[in-house]
Image (cartoon, rainbow, N blue to C red):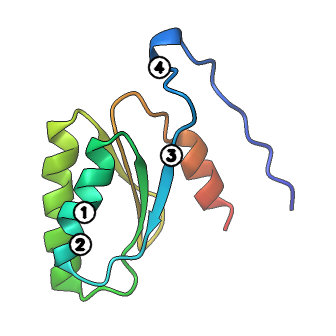
């Protein structure tokens, strides 16, 4: 089907060029710091934890929740095994809409 994406008006201070979206399928907890680095560099990360053991996934998400909080970002679950981790001032609703279509 066709996705009708609506974009909210962007205020000047939020305009940082194109939002970079990283899609990550982590296999283990050791990738947490790399994912946190993406976030700290202003990237939005779409995380698919499907391939992870539950215990490792929980540790990873706890780590990222701390990193997200530290940068004033937002972490939101958009699917059963899909989480969006966004830095400050990123509107994740467009990403949620995109993921929700699948």
Mark pair 1, 2: CA separation:
5 Å
Residue at the extreme top: 12
Q: Find residue 42 and name its label.
A: none
Picture residue at 47% right of the left edge, 20% below the top: 14
Marks 2/4 in contact by CB < 8 Å: the verdict is no
**Local secondary structure at mark 3:** loop
**Nearer the observer, 46 or 3:** 46
Closer to the chain start, of discs 3 and 2, is 3
| Residue that numbered label 1 is attached to | 34
**Local secondary structure at mark 4:** helix
Dot 1: few (<14), some (14–19), or many (≥20) neighbours within 10 Å?
few
Q: Find residue 14 and name its label.
A: 4
Marks 3/1 in contact by CB < 8 Å: the verdict is no
**Nearer the observer, 54 or 85:** 85
Q: Quadrant of residue 29?
A: bottom left
| Residue that numbered label 3 is attached to | 20
Mark pair 2, 4: CA separation:
29 Å
Closer to the chain start, of discs 4 and 1, is 4
Q: Nearer the viewer, mark 4 or mark 3?
A: 3
Closer to the chain start, of discs 3 and 1, is 3
Residue 99 x, y percent position in the rendering: 59, 60
**Residue 44 appears in the picture as rendered:** yes
Q: Find residue 31 and name its label.
A: 2
**Local secondary structure at mark 2:** helix
Residue 22 x, y percent position in the rendering: 47, 58
Mark pair 4, 3: CA separation:
14 Å
């Amino acid at each position: 089907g066709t996705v009708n994406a609506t974009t909210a008006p962007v205020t000047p201070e939020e305009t940082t060029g194109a939002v970079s979206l990283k899609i990550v399928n982590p296999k283990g907890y050791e990738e947490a710091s790399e994912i946190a680095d993406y976030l700290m560099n202003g990237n939005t990360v779409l995380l698919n934890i499907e391939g992870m053991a539950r215990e490792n996934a929980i540790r990873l998400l706890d780590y990222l929740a701390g990193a997200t909080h530290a940068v004033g970002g937002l972490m939101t679950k958009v699917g059963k095994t899909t989480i969006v981790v966004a830095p400050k001032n990123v509107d994740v609703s467009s990403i949620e809409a995109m993921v929700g279509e699948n």
